[in-house]
Image: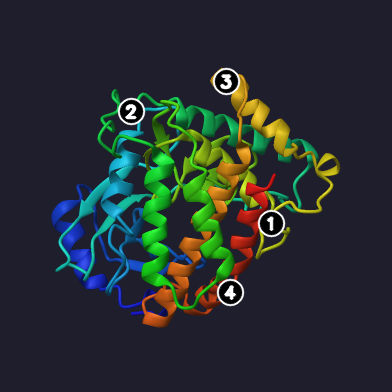
Amino acid sequence: MPADLDNLDLASVDAYLERNLPGYQGPLTATKFTGGQSNPTYELQTPGRTYVLRRKPPGVLLKSAHAVDREFRVQRALSNSKVPVPEMYLLCEDDAVIGSAFYVMERLEGRGFFEPTMPGETKETRKAVLDEMNRVLADLHDVDINAVGLSDFGPQGNYFERQVTRWTKQYRASETETIADMDDLITRLQASIPADDGQRTLVHGDFRIDNLMFERGGSRCIGVLDWELSTIGHPFADLAAVIMQWQMPPGKDGRGLAGVDRDELGLPSDAAFIESYCRRRGLPGIENFGFYLAFNFFRMAGILQGVYKRSLDGNASDPDRARILGSYVPGFAKFGLSALDQ
């Protein structure tokens, strides 16, 4: 077994799929996808077909984290919607098979963009890809959650109140040192949560260009991936997540657009992207956008702190990368405070 499979028991996977997946036929080999810090993901190769397996990390985890069953459910529910997702084949919640729950899905054949500057692409392609990203986001938030069976996918009530409480608990559970700006951000967010405006939609939770897959040679999105943080909540959280990512520096670490000449590259301004989204959803505009932006910086800081803590505990998907990401937490806290001051 290759060393990079992190103790994935291929023999057990092979036997399980032989029993439970119609049309499956081994022998089976696998390769782990690199770069992810949430649920370890593998390409499964057989002579006749390629699949993707996504599993919960082994070991002790934060409560409610890495819920592969929720990822499986939401993607299966969206199979006939305007939101493109891979086909879901099966979910295994029996830890005895490989040590943690997992699911198997379709292997999409397309291309991804690791950062929004899309190096090597034309100005026209960049413009078309980000417009398609905007379209998918708007369609996601227009999904009829009752019709697709997801009305119970998240609790009722003020989404941001719930999320600030949840991620404060997650952050405290993985806290390794006192970060004054993070403490200040938590206090200020708790004091400035907007009143519930009644919007209740499916939200992805980590919507950004590197979690989308596009057709080869074109701009059509063929798959939205990594649904670990999905729930029923407020759509502006997803929209602000896109804008948050763009505040980061460009390149492989920041994957943002800070300081980039967007007109030269064919990329929309923050305001233009928000305006297109509002037009697609028939909204007049968005007030108090600084709060939604600050919330996303806060939540990302909490996520990165959890990634760093898993590296110390020995169950991070990519330990070296996890330690680097953990060093970004103070910076995200500062960005969050700045957003609140906008």
The amino acid pointed to by label 4 is Ser
Q: Is residue 164 left or right of residue 13?
A: right
**Quarter occupied by residue 78:** top left
Residue at point 61%, 30% (across, down): 287
Residue picked out by circle 3: 283
Q: Residues within 10 Å of mark 3 (few under 14, many from 20)?
A: few
Q: Is residue 52 above or below residue 30?
A: above
Task: Say if mark 2 contacts mark 4, CB within 8 Å.
Answer: no
The amino acid pointed to by label 2 is Ile
Q: Residues within 10 Å of mark 1 (few under 14, many from 20)?
A: some
In the rendered image, residue 165, in percent from the top left (x then y), is placed at 38, 52
Q: Residues within 10 Å of mark 4 (few under 14, many from 20)?
A: some
Task: Say if mark 1 contacts mark 4, CB within 8 Å.
Answer: no
The amino acid pointed to by label 3 is Leu
Residue at point 30%, 73% (across, down): 8
In the rendered image, residue 253, in percent from the top left (x then y), is placed at 65, 65
Residue picked out by circle 1: 248
User: Given this view, does label 2 or label 3 mark the residue nearer the observer?
Assistant: 3
Q: Between disc 1 and disc 4, whose residue precedes?
A: 1
Q: Between disc 2 and disc 4, whose residue precedes?
A: 2
Look at the numbered disc 3 and give the secondary structure of its residue. Answer: loop
Task: Say if mark 2 contacts mark 1, CB within 8 Å.
Answer: no
Residue picked out by circle 4: 327
192 or 118, nearer to the observer:
192
Residue picked out by circle 2: 145
Q: Between disc 2 and disc 3, whose residue precedes?
A: 2
82 or 191, nearer to the observer:
191
How far apart, in angstroms, are the residues tagged by discs 1 and 3? 27 Å
